Amino acid sequence: MVHTEDASSRKREIEEKLKQEQETLSFIRENLEKSDQQTKGMVSILSSFESRLMQLENSIIPVHKQTENLQRLQENVDKTLSCMDHVISYYHVAKDTDRIIREGPTGRLDEYLACIAKIQKAVEYFQDNNPDSPELNTVKARFEKGKELLEAEFRSLLTRYSKPVPPILILDAISLDEELEVQEDVVLEHLPEAVLQDVICIAGWLVEYGRNQDFMNVYFQIRSNQLDRSIKGLKDHFRKNSASSGILYSPAVQTKRKDTPTKKSPKRPGKDDVLDIEIDSYIHCISAFVKLAQSEYALLVEVIPEHHQKKTFDSLIQEALDNLMLEGDNIVSAARRAIMRHDYSAVLTIFPILRHLKMNKAEFDSTLQGTAASTKNKLPTLITSMETIGARALEEFADSIKNDPDKEYNMPKDGTVHELTSNAILFLQQLLDFHETAGAMLASQETSSSASSYTSEFNKRLLSTYICKVLGNLQLNLLSKSKVYEDPALSAIFLHNNYNYTLKSLEKSDLIQLVTVTQKKAENSYRELIEQQIQMYQHSWLKVTENLTSRNMPVFQPGSKLKDKERQVIKDKFKGFNDGLEELCKTQKGWAIPDKGQRDFIRQAQRRVVSEAYRAFLHRCANVSFTKNPEKYHKYRPEEVEEMIEKLFDTSA
């Protein structure tokens, strides 16, 4: 029974669920039907919308195309109008630019160049589009006029603002202050910056558009003139200021003068100062040329096109360089004339100049790099001329020392140093100031294979050989001259003085070091010569002292009576000594030994020899009665004899 109830209960449940499912299914079906209806409605709306869009597009596209065509037409009209305006403007260029072109570019270069650019474009337009039009000739003429005025402005700016560099500024630029560790470069400003920029601008335009190279000739002529005037101004500065005040240099920087001889020749009194100024002037002008030429080149590269720079520079420096070389040739000619007059000291002017030229040759060559061969060769040619004439002067000087004639009137009466000796030594000392230059000068004339490589040592040996040759010639000539004296003692004093002067002069300067390069024992040789002459001089006193020797002296006992003959021998000895002493002292008092040390040495040696012999003689005759008038023979006490000898070589005594 219970089981039946369970089954019916379950059946009810199932039926209940089934009913619910059917209701759900029914609900879904209804919703699907509604969705289908909505979809159909939406499709219908979209179809209608698409249809309308198509209708709209079909209406709009033709309108859009029409509008586009209208815009294109409008643009073409605008372009045409613009082109018309542009073309018409070319016909007005001549009129629009007339005033500016006529008034020229001064003070408004940018505006002027802009104006010419317009004219240039007009020329190009008419040449391309209407070459037969009268307008082309008009604008062409206007362009040529504009170019002409630009060329004139270029010349005018350079002429107006190019000024010679003041001498003081040049001296500052070429001088060195050895106290300054870092040298400040002195800038030589040739043109004001604004003017320079205008000049560069015009030059650039003339090259690019003007098809004109005449401006380069204008440039080098104007700048060449200023370069030459700058150097001449420096020369005038030396001539004016040197003579009056002695102030040659800017107070800012003092130049150390190293190139002028320090010792002067007595042959040219009164000329040395003028000559020194000329030497100084020329040396400074050479340095000035290099410095100014370098600054001219620096200026030129900013103005002149690159492939014309070297040629223009070459032309620019010619006048100043030629003037310097001409002046150098004049110095060589003056030296040649001096040699003909046998004034060899005048030739020394060449040495400082030659040294300076050779010291500056590398910088000179560097500055002239790229110029014509004829330009580069000018300095080497001058150097060669100077070396040749200098070497000739040295050779002829050596010969003149050898061949100086032995004339009585030319000989010093007191046996002092001969002018030939002092001149020869002075010349050699001056040569010492330029020993490198002189050595190279001698080497330049060598043709031997050993001279193929001119080293400093080789040149030094050549100069040493030359100096020894001069000294040898001098020695031979002095020996010959000494024979003019009748008194051998005076000959000896003369040679002594000259040899001693030579040795002392060699030792005081560095000449002795040069001499010993080739003659190691030169000093000893001179000392021996001097000693020989002292001995020769002392020989002159033998005729006095030989009266004091024991030769022919009678042998006697103190207090014994002498024979007449024996008494006469003693009397003769006293008389011979007294007469000889008086004669020698009188004669030799007038002779000279300028070297005080040597004078004292010779006097003392002579005093000692004579005094000792005289005292010994007096001692021997002390107790001998050989005369009734002893004071007649015993005229001088030993002290008096010594005093007399002390007054030798002293004209004031």
Image: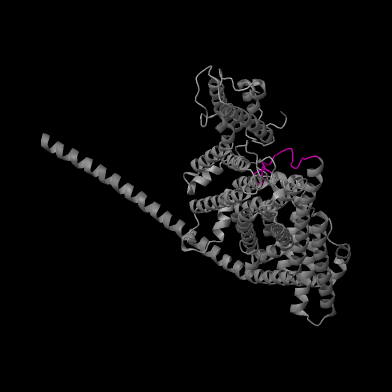
- Classify residue 512 by image quadrant: top right
Looking at this view, is 319 or 293 the one in front? 319
Q: Is residue 246 magenta?
A: yes
Provide residue 196's location: percent of width, then percent of height.
Answer: 75, 54
Toward which corner of the image does residue 533 lie, by quadrant?
Answer: top right
Q: Position of residue 609 (x, y in %)?
A: 55, 28
Q: Is residue 84 above or below residue 507?
A: below
| Residue 305 in view | no
- Residue range (magenta): 245-263
Q: In the picture, which quadrant includes the N terminus?
A: top left
Q: Is residue 486 visible?
A: yes
Overall secondary structure of the magenta stretch?
A: loop
Q: Residue at x 19, y 38 (%)?
A: 9
Quarter occupied by the C terminus: top right
> Would you say residue 293 sits in the magenta stretch?
no
Residue sitting at 62 percent across and 34 percent down?
595
Task: Name the residue at the bottom extreme.
Answer: 132
Q: Nearer the viewer, residue 90 or 451?
A: 451
Kindly indicate the quadrant of the structure image that contains residue 214. bottom right
At horizontal 78% and vertical 77% (from top left) the residue drawn is 126
Q: Position of residue 217 (x, y in %)?
A: 75, 67
578 sits to left or right of 563: right
How many numbered markers are drawn?
A: 0
Q: Can you say whether 100 is above or below 192 in the image?
A: below
